[in-house]
Amino acid sequence: MQVIYATPIENADNDIIVLKKLSRETRDTRMRSRYDVIRLSLQGRKVKEIADILNIDYQTVRNYILAYNKSGLDGLIIKKPPGKTRKLTEQQEAQLYDCIVNKMPKDVGFAPFANWTASLACKWVEREFGVVFSGRGMRNVFERLNLSYTRPTYVLKKADLLEQEAFVQYFEELKKN
């Protein structure tokens, strides 16, 4: 079994002081664990001993030390996981955005509908690109494209304001009785 130690970039005492400070200041327990691994390694502890002290896996300790040896403190930074790949390309998302913003559903073959909904957008995407989305998945795409998803509210253009006011007063009288 090969013994691995963290190799200090300049001098170990200075690195140990910096790592203690970083470990105390961080709120992220995963980063604190990484700093502690390197600090203990710089103090001369063996990988197995560090794993036992911090109650983490032997291989994890080795990986932290190797990352530190390769890139210094920058090698310890936790990177954001890439996540699932998108179903639509950027070009397809741009086409979807253009369609929703500039066209009505009836313009693209959804005759009786006047407003875009997530389910209509799902049908359009499936027809155009052959990609199946759930309603929630399409609303996530809307969010990514900065499209607000709201239900339409209807305003009567020919409503008589005087009749509406009279109804409100009549309704208030009914509530009192």
Image (spheres, rainbow, N blue to C red):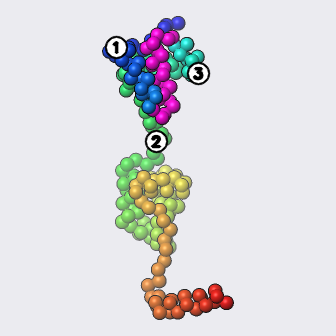
For residue 166, above or below residue 125: below
N-terminal-most mark, 1 or 3: 1
Disc 1 versus disc 2: distance between alpha carbons?
A: 43 Å
Q: CA distance from mark 1 to mark 3?
A: 27 Å
Q: In the image, residue 51 lies at what x, y percent?
A: 55, 17
What is the span of residues highlighted in magenta in the rendered image?
Answer: 26-46
Figure quadrant of the C terminus: bottom right
The first of marks 3 and 2 along the sequence is 3
The answer to whether one can see residue 17 in this image is yes
The residue wearing badge 3 is 55
User: Mark 3: which secondary structure?
Assistant: loop
The residue indicated by pointer 2 is: 85
Q: Amino acid at mark 2?
A: Thr
Q: Position of residue 8 (x, y in %)?
A: 37, 15
Measured as percent of width and height from the top left, residue 87 is found at 46, 47
Tag 3 near tag 2, CB within 8 Å? no
The kind of secondary structure element at disc 1 is loop
Where residue 43 appears, as percent x and y from the top left, is: 45, 12
Pointer 1 local density, CA inside 10 Å: few below 14, some 14–19, many at least 20: few
Residue 63 visible, this angle: no
- The dot on residue 11 is 1
| Image quadrant in which you'd find residue 42 | top left
Which amino acid type corresponds to the residue marked 3 in the rendered image? Asn
Does residue 38 belong to the magenta stretch? yes
Residue beneath the point at 58% across and 16% down? 52
Mark 3 nearby-residue class (10 Å; few <14, some 14–19, many ≥20): few
